[in-house]
Amino acid sequence: MILAMIGPFRRGPRNRRHMRLAGTGGIALTAMAGMVLMAAPRAPIDYSRVRQPFDIVITVDDLSGNGRLPPGVTRLAVADLYIGALKRHRVPDAFGLVNVSKLDRDPDGREVLDRWRRAAYSLGNHSYSHMNLNRAPSLAAWKSDVVTGEQEIARRMRGADWRYFRFPNMAAGKDKAQHDEAIAFLKQRGYRIAEASVSFDDWAYSDAYARCRAKGDAAAIAAMKAQYLQAVDDGIIRMKALSHTLYGRMIPQILLTHLSAWSADMLPQVLDRLDAAGARYVTLQAAQRDPAYQGVDPWEGNQLMMDRVARQRKIATDAIPRLRPADNMKGLCR
């Protein structure tokens, strides 16, 4: 399968969410033996022209692990790769958001959390089973899912600040009443919301990567990497444009990533690109002390913060091109 890449950004109305199948003049989707994803060559971005120092936090969802594993790979090996890359780039703290139910799924899951802590990286709560609030059977069931397993996090974070919560799928309520009750519940338990301001959609690649590794499809994997790194380059530029449009400055950024085999393999290159763009790595606590993260927000925790703020303030961002989706991963290497 050949999927020809379009340009780095999508323009147009917000509701055009999915890639359209077309002929070779649009987004081409053509059957081919080997089912290979091919990327059109792109000139590298000259970061020296856009370099501007900015603070950024690395946050990592879905510990002890996200997505499928390639053959022969363990959750602990993934965590070690992730931690090694973070240490080489002198990241002072990577805040890991935990789904405690995964400790029963993964035989090495508890050791993943223990090794994360031995690296002096923090843990917070991402709900027991990754329950999406908007699709929860009831608010009571969602509250129970938040509380279940807290002790596994608290025990490892003894003496440290662990009461940060990120909504699974960044879904913070199907309506305002549900959102507000959920936020009130979290705050009663002493939680702060772990916001996120930027994502490169690493989660979308995890399962396809495991499938392609299992099939030994090196060409598909190489093209996946090219597409993803283009999305990282584009996302950094979008992040800076949004921040200046909304705040007139670069606010501290909070990057949402996931602890998967794909993300661990790609993290060194992601961090290289962030470094080249001017990144200074800081803690979640330091970033969220910035005024941009303070004050009353009627939809706190819901989706990426800068996009949310733009909608709330009715600030037009049509001139800031959007990243295109990675829907072409769904059928790859099947």
Image: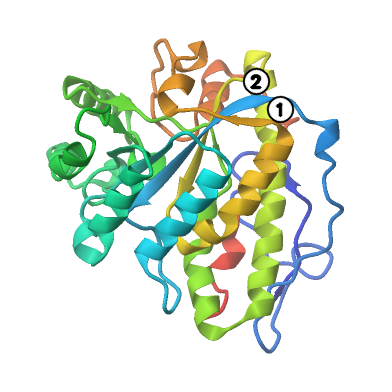
Q: Give the answer, above or below, for where 135 lies relative to 31.
A: above
Instruction: Judge from the rendering whether residue 93 lies leftward or rightward of residue 144; answer left or right.
Output: right
The span from disc 2 to disc 1 (Cα, nearest Å) is: 9 Å
Instruction: Judge from the rendering whether residue 291 lies leftward or rightward of residue 115; answer left or right.
Output: right
Quadrant where the N terminus sits is bottom right
Tag shown at residue 250:
2
Q: Amino acid at mark 2?
A: Met
Identified at 50% across, 34% down, the residue is 304
The residue tagged 1 is 241
| Mark 2 vs mark 1: in front | 2
Residue 100 vs residue 324, the one in the foreground:
100
Tell me how many marks there are: 2
Q: Give the answer, above or below, for where 310 lies relative to 20.
A: above
Identified at 61% across, 65% down, the residue is 328
Instruction: Judge from the rendering whether residue 311 lies leftward or rightward of residue 107; answer left or right.
Output: right
Q: Position of residue 133 (x, y in %)?
A: 28, 41
